[in-house]
């Protein structure tokens, strides 16, 4: 396997590292901007890059449906097709197995699903197919195809899931074409059963991957349950491989997960919030539709250097109330900028051995408590 990870510093269980890929390095802990369909919604790739984002995420299921792996490969892969020349991770489609469950039939061989676009065409996706499509996309980090369960679920269902995830992970790794600067991650499942989480982690480490994701969390369970599952899993994962918590999350979720040894994150939250008039700041979130911002001359966040923060809250409020596209663009870029500032501060605090102090101060400012 050819994806390299350097562990640079630790502070308790918090880790500071660097991942080397064929399309450049990225620093960890890292937040990946979600670019589901080869675009981070409302932003150009230059705008994404300006936020400090180093790695983006694409989705195999959606790109398979439109425009198709063959076309993206013909166009030179996602980097050329979408204009992002840094590292790219692609989700395997496993989350869509859950989110589109009314259109999906699970089998040992793979997943049969009906197109969510027209509701008529049926497709079949095997672990090997998902890996092949991600190869066509030229993804630097390929994710194995798995099944993400709704929580809560029965123990019997979770046990079957863990064993099938391991079988699919083996098939995915066997199908992966190893090459320099590219890697494949396994995905730990096990619902909210600690012993099944530990079992899944052991099964995947026995197979051996370039990195390990923790899946099936942030799907409605309490935050403390999520943290307990992370704390259960990370001791069973190799210290010299990156760890990725899928689909997380809020700034407070990220801080708690870093504290428990996680290196990589992604979530639609900052970009989706930007399109719905929500701004993340060091003093919490703000709804820019609120009339109290109509004549507010302050910036969104006086410690942020993004383009939106060179303008007044009053102007952002005006754009939002007028449904101007620029409002969504500025707020989306601001929110990603905020997340990347947070990740830089986290990395610096781990290097300095002050992560606990930084976390406590951030939470105090963010929550007002």
Image: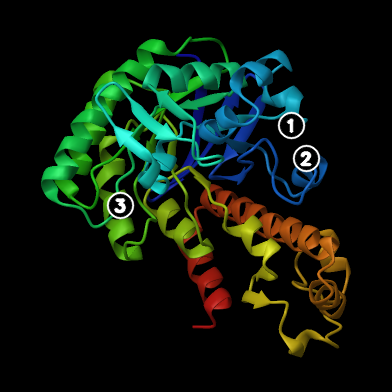
Residue drawn at (64%, 71%) of the image: 282
Tell whether 117 sits left or right of 102. Answer: right
Quadrant of the frame with the N terminus:
top left
Sequence-wise first label, 3 or 2: 2
Pointer 2 local density, CA inside 10 Å: few below 14, some 14–19, many at least 20: some
Q: CA distance from mark 3 to mark 1?
A: 33 Å
C-alpha span from label 2 to label 1: 6 Å
Quarter of image, res 66: top right
Camera-side residue of 30 and 39: 39
Instruction: Indicate the quadrant where residue 237 lies.
Output: top left
Query: Residues at badges 2 and 1 in contact (C-beta under 8 Å)?
Result: yes
To which residue does mark 3 refer?
150
Secondary structure of the residue carrying numbered label 3: loop
Lateral position of residue 301 relative to residue 310, left or right: left
Q: Residue at point 33% right, 57% down? A: 227
Please determine whether, in this image, residue 195 is positioned above or below residue 74.
Answer: below
Tell me: residue 229, above or below residue 222.
Answer: above
What x and y, as percent, mark residue 27?
A: 60, 38
Residue marked by disc 2: 45
Circle 1 residues within 10 Å: few <14, some 14–19, many ≥20: many
Which mark lies nearer to you, 3 or 1?
Answer: 3
Instruction: Report the residue that reaches farthest toward the left.
Output: 156
Q: How many marks?
A: 3
Q: Please tell me which residue lies in front, 193 or 110.
A: 110
Which mark is on residue 324? Answer: none
Q: Which residue is mark 1?
A: 84
């Amino acid at each position: 396997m050819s994806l390299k990870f350097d562990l640079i510093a630790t502070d308790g269980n918090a880790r500071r590292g660097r991942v080397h890929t064929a399309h450049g390095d990225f620093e960890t802990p890292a937040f990946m901007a979600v670019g589901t369909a080869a675009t981070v919604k409302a932003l150009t790739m230059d705008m994404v890059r300006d936020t400090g984002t180093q790695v983006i995420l694409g989705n195999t299921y959606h790109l398979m449906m439109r425009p198709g792996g063959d076309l993206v490969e013909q166009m030179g892969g996602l980097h050329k097709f979408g204009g992002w020349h840094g590292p790219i991770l692609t989700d395997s489609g496993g989350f869509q197995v859950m989110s589109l469950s009314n259109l999906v039939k699970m089998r040992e061989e793979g997943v049969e699903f009906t197109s969510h676009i027209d509701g008529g065409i049926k497709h079949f996706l095997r672990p090997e197919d998902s890996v092949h499509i991600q190869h066509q996309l030229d993804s630097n980090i390929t994710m194995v195809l798995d099944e993400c369960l709704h929580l809560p679920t029965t123990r019997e269902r979770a046990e079957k899931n863990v064993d099938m995830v391991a079988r699919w992970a083996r098939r995915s790794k066997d199908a992966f074409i190893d090459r320099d600067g590219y890697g494949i991650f396994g995905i730990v499942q096990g619902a909210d059963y600690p012993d099944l989480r530990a079992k899944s982690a052991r099964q995947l480490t026995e197979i051996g991957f370039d990195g390990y994701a923790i899946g099936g969390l942030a799907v409605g369970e309490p935050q403390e349950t999520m943290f307990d599952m992370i704390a259960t899993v990370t001791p069973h994962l190799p210290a010299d491989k990156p760890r990725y918590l899928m689909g997380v999350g809020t700034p407070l979720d990220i801080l708690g997960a870093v504290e428990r040894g996680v290196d990589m994150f992604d979530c639609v939250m900052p970009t989706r919030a930007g399109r719905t008039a929500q701004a993340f700041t060091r003093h919490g979130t703000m709804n820019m539709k609120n009339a109290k911002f109509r004549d507010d001359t302050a910036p969104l966040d006086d410690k942020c250097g993004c383009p939106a923060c060179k303008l007044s809250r009053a102007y952002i409020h005006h754009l939002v109330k007028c449904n101007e596209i620029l409002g969504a663009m500025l707020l989306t870029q601001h929110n990603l900028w905020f997340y990347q500032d947070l990740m830089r501060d986290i990395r610096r605090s781990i290097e300095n051995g002050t992560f606990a102090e930084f976390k406590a101060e951030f939470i105090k400012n963010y929550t007002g408590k």
